Image: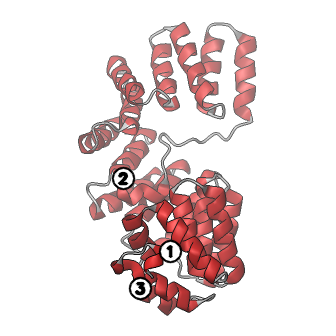
């Protein structure tokens, strides 16, 4: 096996891959515990791709070789090649839920949520106990704004993994979107009980408190998040929203400025700062910030709404009407902070 450039610790992985041929059973996966993680971390993605390619050349129907080469491609951001490998693995073995989960997860990264949902549906049909599939499908529904389905899928995942911080956060965010703040806060409370250091749980609960008209509680949660991660743009943006609701405009302005210093492309911070400028009667600065927010995210309905109101208050009625019409065409709910749900339990 030295010709593959494989160090002794991982040579068993490749010997097993070559021996197994085209089909992989559940017991095979248990025998090889996360081999792609072990191998790729020690050898690098490019070397892994080279070695798995050699295995594929020797055993063209080796499912795990395609799976792990796809993982290496994905790690390198080569999503089309990763998708091709996952698809090849599925064509060889269409009864492995893990393969559909992997490809579904990749589709999420590519923003192809319909295709992701289709793959997670397949994974669940094969393995109704697949927590990953319910989580992935829930995340995909969240991106499509189908929040009732998000609540359902994360609920099913929690039936199987009742201590999943990520699932409580995901369901909590969906409940916030549905304006069910009482239930969402309960979910964030549970997440924080399980992991008091979860930044996303503090951010999520702060968002729910702010939306529920409890800005003081929101400020406490966002401040806690800043204490855990002083450079967190989302925490400053959220806290700025809370101070804005309390009409503590200079403090809000300071938080939005900090958020934009940390991330000049934070469109929510531009929108929030624009609201503060409008409240201070600084009309042109407000319009400028709403316009900057829309330049970064043209589908951000709140900025159209706010700019429309600002135009209207200054009797620019044609411009106000145009912005209102644009807003009508867009999905109204946009989370206070955008996050990758799959990483929620890690923050």
Crowd class of label 2 (few under 14; some 14 to 19; many from 20; radius 10 Å): many
Q: Label 3 belongs to which residue? A: 12
Does residue 232 lie above or below 103 as drawn? above
Label of residue 131 in the image? 1
Circle 2 or circle 3, nearest the eye: 3
Badge 3, how many Cα within 10 Å: few under 14, some, many 20+?
A: some
Front residue (pair 2, 306):
2
Determine the residue positioned at 52% across, 71% down: 51
* SS state under label 3: helix
Residue identified by numbered label 2: 201
Where residue 141 sits in the image (x, y, percent)?
Answer: 62, 58
Residue 97 visible in this rendered orientation of the protein: no
Q: Quadrant of residue 94?
A: bottom right
Q: Residue at x 60, y 42 (%)?
A: 333
Label 2 sits on a secondary structure element that is helix
Give the total number of marks visible in the rendering. Answer: 3
**Marks 1 and 2, the one that precedes in the sequence:** 1
């Amino acid at each position: 096996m030295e010709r593959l450039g494989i160090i002794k610790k991982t040579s068993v992985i490749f010997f097993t891959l070559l021996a197994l041929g085209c089909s992989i059973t559940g017991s095979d996966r248990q025998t090889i515990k996360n081999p792609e993680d072990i191998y790729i971390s020690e050898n690098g993605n490019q070397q892994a791709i080279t070695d798995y390619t050699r295995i594929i050349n020797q055993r063209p129907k080796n499912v795990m070789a395609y799976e792990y080469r796809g993982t290496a491609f994905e790690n390198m951001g080569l999503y089309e090649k990763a998708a091709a490998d996952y698809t090849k693995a599925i064509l060889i073995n269409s009864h492995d839920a893990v393969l559909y989960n992997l490809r579904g997860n990749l589709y999420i990264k590519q923003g192809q949520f319909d295709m992701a949902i289709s793959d997670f549906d397949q994974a669940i049909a094969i393995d109704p106990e697949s927590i990953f599939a319910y989580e992935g499908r829930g995340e995909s529904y969240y991106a499509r704004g189908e929040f009732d389905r998000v609540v359902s899928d994360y609920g099913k995942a929690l039936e199987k993994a009742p201590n999943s911080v990520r699932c409580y956060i995901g369901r909590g965010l969906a409940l916030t979107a549905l304006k069910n703040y009482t239930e969402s806060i309960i979910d964030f409370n549970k997440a924080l009980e399980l992991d008091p250091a979860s930044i996303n749980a503090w951010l999520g609960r702060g968002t729910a408190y702010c939306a529920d008209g409890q800005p003081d509680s929101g400020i406490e949660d966002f401040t806690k998040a800043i204490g855990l991660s002083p450079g967190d743009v989302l925490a400053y943006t959220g806290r700025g929203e809370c101070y804005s609701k309390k009409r503590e405009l200079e403090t809000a302005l300071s938080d939005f400025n900090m958020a934009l210093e940390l991330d000049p492309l934070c469109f929510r911070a531009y929108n929030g700062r624009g609201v503060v400028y409008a409240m201070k009667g600084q009309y042109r600065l407000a319009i400028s910030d709403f316009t900057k927010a829309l330049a970064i995210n043209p589908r951000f309905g709140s900025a159209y709404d706010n700019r429309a109101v600002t135009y209207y208050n200054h009797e620019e009625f044609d411009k106000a009407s145009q912005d209102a019409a644009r807003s009508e065409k867009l999905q109204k709910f946009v989370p206070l902070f955008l996050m990758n749900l799959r990483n929620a339990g890690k923050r």
